[in-house]
Image: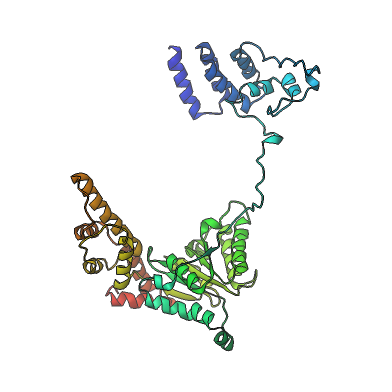
Amino acid sequence: MSADPLIESLTAALDARPDDLPLRLHLAALLLDAGRAGEAIAQVGQALARDPGNGQAQALMQRALGGSVPPPPTPSPADPRPPAQRPAPAGAGGSAATADHDPLAAYEQELADVVPPRFARAGDEPEPVAGHSDRVYDVEASGIRLADVGGMSAVKERLELAFLGPLRNPELRRMYGKSLRGGLMLYGPPGCGKTFLARAVAGEMGAKFISLSIVDVLDMWMGNSERNLHELFQAARRNAPCVLFLDEVDALGHKRSQVGSSSMRTLGNQLLAELDGMEGSNEGVFVLAATNTPWDVDPALRRPGRLDRVVLVLPPDAEARRSILEYHLRERPIAGIDLRKIVAATEDYSGADLAHLCETAAEFAMADSVRTGEVRMIEHRDLERAVKEVRPSTKPWMATARNVAMFANEGGVYDDLVAYLKRRRML
């Protein structure tokens, strides 16, 4: 077998077994025999990085570099001191004495552009950034108001009773002993505007807004997840009045009886303690949570004083669908669109579905313009075609919700859902 096919075979084998030093050194020797010194140096350098004292690797490196260790630099006339007493050259990252007595250090300097250094040096650390902290949470000032939310009159009324009314009437609040602390859980099909609604509540209250999801909390080290959760609540307390939005709360507060991980159970306990205010006063902190699967949320989270109020956020009604369609078509070139017909054809569509519908109609019009070479407007036919292609994403959720409403409505938690399904003759 000629050398090149053998080298290719060994290289492929080495990709599968990168820590096989004998194989790597055998490949380096073949590369040297084939006159491919640069590739051989790279292979030997990786071997030395794994085993600095390997005699075979050192011998191959000497051979690759011309048969001997590179000599130390000649003293300059301006510095007559012997090498051991001279300081290291600027930027060398080590002393000249080290290079004189350690062949590997000499190799490392010679191959600095090919092989990474074996050890980090004191001058290699990045400069610390002034004012940097280990975790930074976004505290926003929401500019969205409830008037920007189309439809959802029942949800707005419930939010007015729970949060907004007591905030606007401090004298009545004090007279009735109504606290500004509390929690409310929004649930419903995905894409129906739960996050947008939470931002609108913050804007209506003139409060700060902090969004919390599972990725902001989880950490691989024991105890850090609980600390992260506590720091998020502390940030909300420092910025009160503040809306703390727990997105996908079922991931953070899943039923502990169904959680196999002790760390996730501990995290759920920490969330309960934070909601109770055991780690600090929650006065002025309004906790809004959102989930697509409230039946997976730990019942302890819905205990009075925690997320004790539950609000169903349904797919947008006709008024809301019209507002959403107008919003997503407002900056697009449109002509001859009968919104009334499109609204009637999209009864089960979520807000996200309607946005995708407008995007799809724009794609059809643009593709037609490219094909014909004549730019045209987005027309009613494009939206009708999009309705046939984009199907509502709420149907699977409704099927699951129907089973929950029929067989798991303990205590009447899902009475609103039952009423909705009966109106739709789905129950």
Left or right of residue 352, residue 163 in this image: right
Q: Nearer the viewer, residue 356 or 51?
A: 356
Tell me which residue sits at (57%, 72%) in the image. 241
Quarter of the rendering occupied by the C terminus? bottom left
Identify the image quadrant of residue 402: bottom left
In the depicted structure, whether residue 10 falls above or below residue 260: above
Nearer-the-camera pick, 421 or 337: 337
Res 314 → quadrant: bottom left
Across and down, in percent, residue 205 comes to 51, 74
Relative image position of residue 384 (x, y in whole percent) = 21, 60
**Picture mark count:** 0
Which residue occupies 56% across, 28% down?
19
Which one is nearer the viewer's eye here, 102 or 195? 195
Horizontally, residue 47 falls left or right of residue 198, namely right
| Residue name at image x 59 percent, y 23 percent | 45
Residue 294, position in %: x, y?
A: 44, 68
- Placement of 104 over or under 387, stated as above or below: above
Q: Is residue 276 above or below residue 371?
A: below
Coloration mode: rainbow
Q: Quadrant of the N terminus?
A: top left
The residue that appears at 35% across and 73% down in the rendered structure is: 151
Q: Residue furthest bottom?
A: 175
- Tell me which corner region of the image, top left, top right, bottom left or bottom right, holds residue 355: bottom left
Q: Confirm whether residue 353 shows in the render.
A: no
Image location of residue 228, percent across then percent down: 60, 59
Q: Is residue 421 visible?
A: yes
